[in-house]
Image (cartoon, helix red, strand yellow):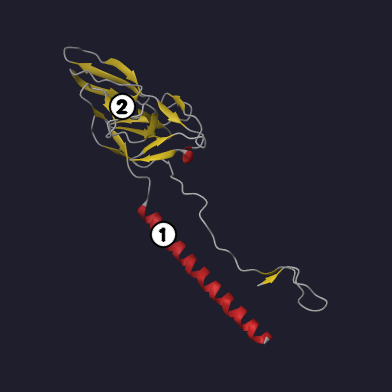
Amino acid sequence: MKFAGTNTSATTISPTGIEVGVGVRSTSIQKHHTTGPIKETGNELDIAIAGKGFFQVQLPDGTIGYTRDGAFKKDETGQLTTSDGYPLIPNIVIPADATFVEIGNDGTVSVKQAGQIGSVNIGQIETALFINPAGLHSLGDNNYINTNASGDPIVGVPGLEGRGQTKHKFLETANVQLVVEMTDLISGQRAYEAGSKAITTSDEMLQTVNGLKR
């Protein structure tokens, strides 16, 4: 190790020096909330968000959570819930005699009931945007809560102000592309190997220099 500014001779100094690094560390691990491929399922309660935004759900402690998992179910009262049983906010209740459910690109929910000719609007799905979605705190199972880092939710109608439209009878699939991730992994491994060889070479050079001094 040789610090910058140390003498290399009686009249010269080292302009840069040689210092051994102290390693690297991860500064953060982030979830990427980019939209994954949208796949048609045919299930009348499946909803995908084609773009930015999160569904709002009521967590067991009464607070509002956020998710992009649109595989909704009906509970015993007909209320739409997530697979974990968390009610969708605002509440949407499907009547027991509903024979047809339709959800528009703007989140409007309509049903056709037995004996009726036309459809009836029964509710409006709203989605939330965040200034910094990477700052959301993960609760697991695709559920999140907002933090100071994410900012407060900006709630509104799907398809407006940058929110993605709601796609009825579709679900979002994983946004991870296996081929791309494997390629990045291989590239990272090769970079690590190259770095290891550089360190080994540097050590050998230092040993040689120390041997010459003796």
170 to 15, vertically: above or below: above
Q: Which residue is mark 2?
A: 87
Q: Is residue 24 left or right of residue 37?
A: right
Where does residue 11 sit, x and y in percent of width and height? 83, 76
Where does residue 155 sit, x and y in percent of width and height? 45, 25
| Numbered circles on residues, count | 2
Residue at left 22%, top 21%?
77
* Amino acid type, label 2: Pro
* Amino acid type, label 1: Thr
SS at circle 1: helix
Neighbour tally class for label 1: few under 14, some 14-19, many 20 plus, Cα within 10 Å: few
Q: Nearer the viewer, residue 209 or 41?
A: 209
Badge number at residue 170? none
Foreground: disc 2 or disc 1:
2
157 to 22, vertically: above or below: above
Where does residue 104 sit, x and y in percent of width and height? 33, 24
Residue at left 38%, top 45%?
175
Residue sitting at the far top: 116
- Residue 182 occupies which quadrant of the picture? bottom left
Badge number at residue 183? 1
Residue at left 39%, top 28%?
64
Q: Quadrant of the N terminus?
A: bottom right
Q: Estimate the spatial distance between the alpha carbons at disc 2 and disc 1, rounded to whole Å.
A: 40 Å
Q: Quadrant of the C terminus?
A: bottom right
Residue at left 27%, top 23%?
102
Where does residue 192 sit, x and y in percent of width and height? 48, 66
172 to 157, vertically: above or below: below
**Nearer the N terminus, badge 2 or badge 1?**
2
